[in-house]
Amino acid sequence: MLSSVSLRVRLFTIFGTMSLLMFICSIAMLWHATEINNLIKRMVQKELVIYKISQKLEVSLANQKGLLTFFFVDGNQEWLDSLETFQTDFERELNQVLNMNLSSWQRQILQEISEKYIVYKTETLHAVEEYLENPATINISEAHARQRDHHFNLLYLCAKLGTEQWDDIIEEEIREIERSEVFKQAGYLAIISFTILCPLFFFLLYKKILGPIRDMALQTGSTFQASSQNEIASLEQSLGNMKKGYDQANDELTRSRKNLVEAEKMAMVGELAAGVAHTIRNPFTSIKMRMFTLSRSSQLSNDQTEDLKVISEEIDRIDNVVTSFLEFSRPPKIKLEKHDLKEVIQSVGKLMEFKLQGKNAELTYDFQPDLPEVLIDYDRMREALLGLLTNSCEAFVGSGRIVIRTASGYDPNDGNVVEITVRDDGPGIPESIRDKVTSPFFTTKDEGSGLGLSIVDRIAREHGGKLSIIPTNTGTKIRIRLPM
């Protein structure tokens, strides 16, 4: 039954019960504190005041009786003045308690005391007047007898008020003790329930949430110490690393798909190039040999000699195109060895001297000192640099300048790298075609094959590097980045 209840419901039920217990206990404590406060105020301001006044009334009645007796004995007027003071105090105390918020039985007894005291006071005045008229003949016992019953009735009522008032106070105390006992038992029950629910809540929290989160963090690459200190942060870091790994894998997959598509294209190009080589190159070789023989054995005019030269150059150009197709479709396997990039670049510069002179172009170098040797295929890297320098020369109109620069750097994905930058001050590559120039067969030249930069890009990738075209205000800037 319990296993069918979801973890969320169990946690919410336990936490809700704990919160409800806390809320109920808080409300109950506030209510009880308010009741205690009201009880104390009621006791101090009313119940004890009434009890105290009932005692005062009894004492006042006794004093009044004694003062009247003293007056009858010696006739001293001062006893009457004191009697009048006590009577005034009695009436003031009585009126004070009558103005309170009384219960029905309290008001009934006090009202009866007030009525009987008026009669008692009247009888006392009559007795005093008779004594003043004929003090020699008055009998003290007879004088007291007239208001004796009223006096005792008043004493009884005052004693009854005090007794019942005290009983009321005791009953209120008993009720409060019983109520406190109920609250005490409820508090004990709440404490026991809270003591049981708290470990249960933390057990579920650890067993069903924090424990699995820590296990997941450990399984996703976190350390035991990190996952023990903060499971959530550890899992977040592990998931971040997983996301980073996923992004890298996705990038690799995208590149692999791109390479696969390109490989399929190259396979088709390879088949085409093989057919072209078989069908065209052999006849072209025979034609070139016949033309060479013809130029040696015949007496040709200057125009005919020029025509033969043009034909031979065009055949060479076609042969170069076919060779480019073959090279692009079936690149040789690279052989990586450590080489000094400075020597490789300078050897390419020497090969390009005559072409640079023919284009009136200047080649300069900017080598980083103490650059470490790099694992490269010597011939393939020379081929890539020759392609870049050839493109720069062919782009010049009139004259130009080429700068080859080497430097070390750092890439977030590849770590330490070496960069070869070739920059010229030619017309540059328009931004609209900058992303297309490394695509196979894309060219803006009338006589180009569209494989030059594509072959350079392939050579860079074969070395685990990358070819980038850097935007500049003037000229062209191409960078080959190789892992160190």
Image: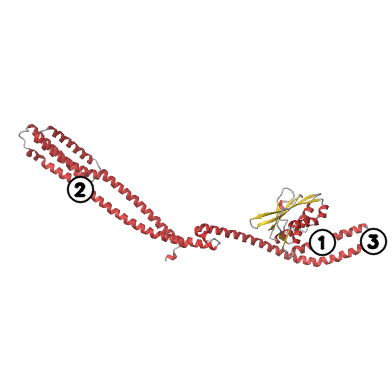
Q: Residue furthest front?
A: 370
Does 393 appear above or below 320? Answer: above
In primary-sequence order, the first of circles 2 and 3 is: 2
Q: Residue at x 19, y 41 (%)?
A: 56
Left or right: 43 with respect to 419?
Answer: left
When asked about the image quadrant of residue 354, the answer is bottom right
Q: How far apart, in angstroms, are the residues tagged by discs 1 and 2?
A: 133 Å
Q: Nearer the viewer, residue 4 or 195?
A: 195
Residue for badge 1 = 318
Spatial distance from mark 2 to mark 3, Cα to Cα?
Answer: 159 Å
- Residue 412 place in picture, x, y as percent: 63, 56
Callout 1: SS: helix
Asked whether 333 or 22 is in front, the reply is: 333
* Circle 3 SS class: loop
- Give yes or no for contact between labels 1 and 3 (Cβ–Cβ under 8 Å): no
The residue to which callout 3 is attached is 299
Q: What kind of residue is marked 2?
A: Glu
Using the numbered discs, state the Cα–Cα distance from disc 1 to disc 3 in whole angstroms.
Answer: 28 Å
Residue at the spot of label 2? 164
Tell me residue 240's x, y (percent).
56, 58
Kind of residue at badge 3: Gln
Residue 386's tag is none
Category of crowding for the residue at label 3, using alpha-carbon neighbours closer than 10 angstroms: few (below 14), some (14–19), many (at least 20): few
Residue at x 57%, y 59% (from the top left corner): 241
Residue drawn where x is 17% and y is 35% of the image:
85
x then y, percent, for residue 104: 22, 46
Disc on the earlier residue, 1 or 3: 3
Q: Position of residue 12 (x, y in %)?
A: 43, 58
**Of the pair 121 and 353, the residue shown nearer to us:** 353
